[in-house]
Image: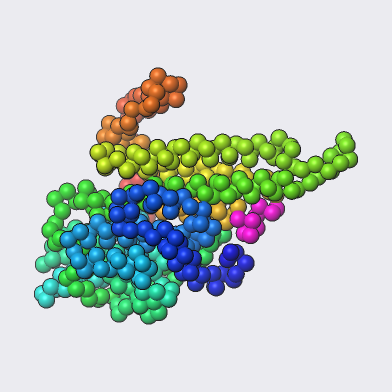
Amino acid sequence: RTNTTPRTGRVVCPRNTIKSIIALYKLEAEDILLTTPRYWEFHTDPISVMDCSAGTLLTIHYNLCCGTFARCSASRSELAKILEKMLSFQMMGQFCLTELGHGLDVMNLETTATLLPDGSFLLNTPVMRAAKYMPPTAPCGIPCIAVVFARLIVHREDRSIKPFAVPLHDGYTMAKGVTVKVLSPRGASRPLEHSLTYFTNVRLHLEALMDTMDKLENVRQGFFQQISRVVAGTLSMGVSALAPMKIGCFITARYSQRRMVTDASTGKLRPIISFRTQHAPILTVLAHIYVMEAFSKKCITLFSDNSIDFGLRHCITAVGKIGLLGHCQESLISLSERCGAQGLFEVNQLSVLHADMRGASIAEGDLLVLAIRFAMELLIGRIEFPEPNDPSGFLAQRELSMIDELRQLSTDTPPMTPIRYIGTQQSALAY
């Protein structure tokens, strides 16, 4: 337990927790690449949320970094050797994709990797807004390597965004040309040294490029293929919400059994769980847990089916994340309120679990933006959900009627007129 340790000391603690979790699960490249049952078992284990700092670092390490290395190392022995070190935690992995000025529009990232005449690359952060935001890349006592996404520049030609394997530090000292600025702590959640990462004339060997130098024919499709581990991470974040719901439900139920009040009519003590206003929210969350467990298993089954189109699988991960994390956040607030003032204290976990899950809802794709994107793709017919188990059921019929209603509404609604907003230095169109 680390919740009574000062925040400065707790930043270092996850390293030991991570070693213990890695020794327990011993995930291999195939587990991560193929998202085997062992992979999902790790993401639903309560151990990852009991110390969410360790859980966050491991999710980045396993899914994003090791997963990308596993995808690229089939014919690259030098990448396979690095992957082995990461799987045994001789080296920590990070994933530097989004930038300070480019989050959801990360396809417009500005970090560059320029090919030099000798065959090496020069990695640079050209402007302040291109700083990688916000992986925890500061030294933590173990060597670290990152998958860094940058625009490949060859003879002044933009060859599109490519992944590069970039050593960040040896555990204590940053690599030459790499600068890290640790951000201020996130409110209420467990401490983690989120950072801004800058690159200044960082020399990389030719082998650092994890893809070919060819320019992508379909830039959008190729980019999403490059960051395909983010799609798996979307559902991984979703299923991680099951454990906080279970923990919160148990804590609130035990507190409600222990907390006694005097009954005005009998003068005797009675536990507050005997009141409907207390036990109804607990039982509601308990029911949600059973439903969400079945829901998560269905999402995992569909996502793991490689015969399904990748776009639909991405949509399924989004639906899973939105449903699971949405219920989780609502449940934790409801349970915390039933614990009164004690629900506010970190040691009782409810408030900090909610803050951790708020972070998870943003990681690997903001919930609202994911919902808007795939709702529109569903309405225009770009994707189509699998057939329900019972097409004649009330729920399936309700789904079809809602989709038909929204399609009709979108057809009848005239296009919006662009509104021009004039800023201090430039104008922009808002729709």
Pinpoint residue 329: horizontal percent, then vertical percent: 53, 46
276 is higher (above) or lower (below) than 249: above
160 is higher (above) or lower (below) than 276: below
Q: Quadrant of residue 320?
A: top left
Q: Is residue 311 left or right of residue 349?
A: left
In the foreground, 127 or 191: 191
Dominant secondary structure, magenta: helix
Pinpoint residue 29: horizontal percent, then vertical percent: 30, 58
Q: Residue at x 60, y 69 (%)?
A: 5
In the foreground, 422 or 304: 304
The quarter of the rendered structure image containing the C terminus is top left
The quarter of the rendered structure image containing the N terminus is bottom right
310 is higher (above) or lower (below) than 172: above
101 is higher (above) or lower (below) than 276: below
Does the stretch in magenta take in 343?
A: yes
Pinpoint residue 425: horizontal percent, then vertical percent: 34, 59
Q: Quadrant of residue 405?
A: top left
Is residue 144 in view? Answer: yes
Q: Is residue 343 left or right of residue 355?
A: right
What's drawn in magenta, residue-wise? 341-349
Is residue 133 in view? Answer: no
In the foreground, 411 or 83: 83
